[in-house]
Image: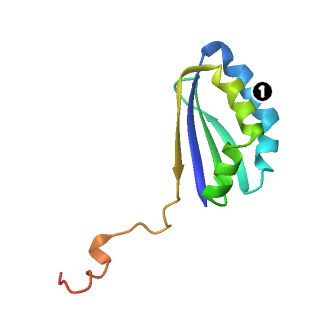
Amino acid sequence: MITRLVKLTLLPERTLEFEQFFAREAADIGTWPGCQGVKAFRDSEDSGIYFTQSLWESAQALEAYRQSDFFRSNWQVVKAWFAAPAQAWSTYALPLEPFDPRQSSSPAGTQS
């Protein structure tokens, strides 16, 4: 499972337009093959900063979406509202129990 995080810094006069646009498009994005859901968040201190989060079954599903005409046309609309370039990360969730090197076994052939 891939979580795609995108930070968008928007022009102040475009924030309401972005929220309306996202509300209309989110349902279609969420039904894209391999997409497990999509959400948007607004920064608590800077009302021009937004984050989107989408969950994908695989990197291939995400890439197929990013290469689609649907994505490209939506991205062109939103890109015109940027106050700064977008930043994006493809991430994997950490396991529920964090790795603790003090509790792991030593690599083969070494002693602790």
Using the rendered view, name the quadrant where residue 7 is placed. top right
Kindly identify which residue carries mark 1: 20
Q: How many labels sit on residues? A: 1
Q: In the picture shown, does residue 103 fall above or below 8? A: below
- Residue 81, position as x, y percentages in the image: 64, 19
- 64 over 108 or under it: above or below: above
Q: Which amino acid does label 1 sit on?
A: Gln
Q: Residue at x 52, y 58 (%)?
A: 92
Q: Residue at x 77, y 38 (%)?
A: 70
67 relative position to 28: left or right: left
Q: Which residue is drawn at 75% across and 31% down?
A: 73
Q: Residue furthest top?
A: 13
Nearer to me, 8 or 39: 8
The quadrant where residue 53 appears? top right
The x and y percentages for residue 35 are 72, 53
Instruction: Report x, y in % for residue 37.
Output: 72, 51
- Quadrant location of residue 61? bottom right
